[in-house]
Image (cartoon, grey):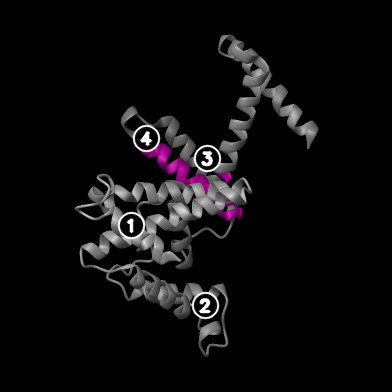
Amino acid sequence: MIERLVTIMARLRDPERGCEWDTVQTFDTIAPYTIEEAYEVADAIARNNVAELKDELGDLLLQVVFHARIAEEAGHFALPDVVAAISDKMERRHPHIFGDATDGGHHLWEVIKAEERAAKADASAIGGVALGLPALLRAEKLQKRTARVGFDWTDPNDARAKIDEELAEVAAASDAERAEEVGDLLFAVVNWARKLGVEPEAALRAGNAKFERRFRAMENIAGDAFAKLSLDEQEALWQRVKAGEKAAS
């Protein structure tokens, strides 16, 4: 069935008969769309919309086929090589399922991943953490990697104290220093969230959704007059919406 999609992409990329947009795309120009489609998959899941999830997974699959086609044209690899590589990886990382190992589970997965990283040119504990990840997610991954080699607080209160330290440094920072210090503060917040067992990326997505829901509710109540309300009046409206949510829960 996927062969049909592969054929469609080959036709779209055909230099003579293809689409004028598709034929000029590169890995770099397509990458943002790949990231966007992955987020749209996550969004459909968060909204429990199975029909949209089907469509979004198709859009994400198209991105894989697109990248593979560009690579094939350049003589690097083709889609079957991509499938073979991930199949080999999944079997290699699950020797307790596909091999003779008796020990298994997530611990073994992490051990094998660490061995694979050590065999690469960048053998650092933080090697391979993708630069293209969202900043909160990448911060969490960096912290998890360094924690595996002992660079981590054992007490969550120490991570919490670091936030107070970074807040003070933001307050004392010059204009030139402020962005860097705010970055340190956000990194510290991610670290504390990790120590509390909270995924910061998911938590912020939920926070964004809550803000959007409450703000739209405020607009629905005030109508066209919302922008003319004073800040105190808008805050009172916010508290009204918030109280309504709590009463309904």
Residue carrying label 1: 9
Q: Which label's residue is closer to the chain start, 2 or 1?
A: 1
Q: Nearer the viewer, mark 4 or mark 3?
A: 4
Residue type, numbered disc 4: Ala
Indicate whether 78 appears above or below 203.
Answer: below
Asked where in the image residue 249 lies, by quadrant, the reply is: top right
Start-end of magenta stretch: 180-204
Query: Is 61 left or right of 101, judged from the image as shown?
Result: left
Closer to the N terminus: mark 3 or mark 2? 2
Question: In terms of sequence position, does the residue under pointer 3 or pointer 1 come before the other?
Answer: 1
When the figure is inspected, residue 235 is found, relative to residue 145, above or below; the finding is above
Counting residues from the start of the chain, the first of labels 4 and 3 encountered is: 3
Q: Nearer the viewer, residue 227 or 36?
A: 36
Q: Residue at x 58, y 31 (%)?
A: 212
Say which residue label 4 marks: 179
Please tell me how crowded label 3 is: few (under 14), some (14-19), or many (20+) other residues with Cα within 10 Å.
some
Residue to which mark 2 is pinned: 108
- Residue 171: x and y in percent read 44, 30
